[in-house]
Image (tube, rainbow, N blue to C red):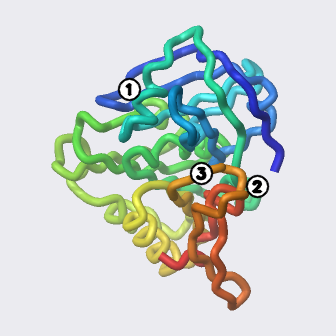
Amino acid sequence: MSYRCGEYKLLKKTALAENIYSFTIECPEAAELARCGQFVHILAPGFTLRRPISVCEIDRKAGTLRVVFLVKGEGTKAISRINEGEYLDMIAPLGNGYSVSSVSAGGRVIVVGGGIGVPPLLQTAKHFDNVTAVLGFRSYGNIILADEFRKVCRDVTICTDDGSVGEKAIVTVPLKRELEKGDASAVFACGPTRMLNAVADMAKEYGVFCEVSLEERMGCGVGACVGCVARISRNGEEKLLRVCKDGPVFNAEEVLF
């Protein structure tokens, strides 16, 4: 795992929704190494531990990474207060991303995201010509990146819990419709654990390759502290693997939810 550590300039800061921010960060060395599904580890000002944030977009030509995150504690609140032109202490890129190169050419890919699990799937979708996106949110006010997905996907289905936009359904409802078409080569998913479990079961039912991105509390982000383990079944043996280093993306059939 190759990564860079340093202080990087925040070029652009945007509020996408309540307590959800988009940062575009100038970091040419990290952008050159980054792959979809990986994450960055940002030091929150005034705190000891870093906060992991998924990579949303990679622009190697501009030398930038874009991350989108939800403020859900004092650490991410401190990060959200960093302003354009200031510098972030960041380690990037970290972890293993989606196996986009293993998908057969010409096959249709389905990306499934829930809430703040949606951002890392944007860069993933950009790797393919035939992509269907299924995105789930609580309500209209929580929807993010929908227009960006529409630019790179052939079809985008929005689900909301309250029915304020799109379908009033959980993401597995439209996912089932898409899998029934029989032309899907892979499903890539990121979101809450219960959602990932359901997506994994459905992909297995239809015999479609599926990878999921797991979220756990992380300390070091590089596999040293072993504080972010997940139960994985591999080669007939149950193992505890590190989400930060061995993941965060795993073959869905291996994850013991």
Query: Where residue 16 is drawn, which disc sits there?
Result: 1
What kind of residue is marked 1? Leu
Q: In this view of the protein, can residue 145 be seen by the observer?
A: no
Label 1: element kind: strand
What kind of residue is marked 2? Ser
Query: Where residue 29 is drawn, which disc sits there?
Result: none
Residue 104 locus on image (x, y percent):
73, 61
Relative depth, front residue between 115 and 6: 6
Determine the CA span between mark 1 and mark 2.
31 Å
Above or below residue 61? Residue 110 is below
Residue 224 locus on image (x, y percent):
72, 57
Q: Which residue is mark 2?
A: 101
Residue 22 locus on image (x, y percent):
48, 26
Determine the CA span between mark 1 and mark 3.
27 Å
Q: Nearer the viewer, mark 1 or mark 2?
A: 1
Relative depth, front residue between 45 and 167: 45
Q: In this view of the protein, can residue 208 be seen by the observer?
A: yes
Residue at image point 40% right, 58% down: 192
Q: Which residue is mark 3?
A: 219
Residue at image point 59% right, 33% down: 43
Left or right? Give the position of 34 relative to 244.
right
Residue 237 locus on image (x, y percent):
68, 88
Q: Earlier in the sequence, mark 3 or mark 2?
A: 2
What kind of residue is marked 3? Gly
- Structural crowding at the residue carrying mark 3, measured as other residues with C-alpha within 10 Å and reported as few (<14), some (14–19) or many (≥20): some
Label 3: element kind: loop
Above or below residue 201? Residue 250 is above
- Structural crowding at the residue carrying mark 1, measured as other residues with C-alpha within 10 Å and reported as few (<14), some (14–19) or many (≥20): some
- Structural crowding at the residue carrying mark 2, measured as other residues with C-alpha within 10 Å and reported as few (<14), some (14–19) or many (≥20): few
Left or right? Give the position of 166 relative to 247.
left
Label 2: element kind: helix
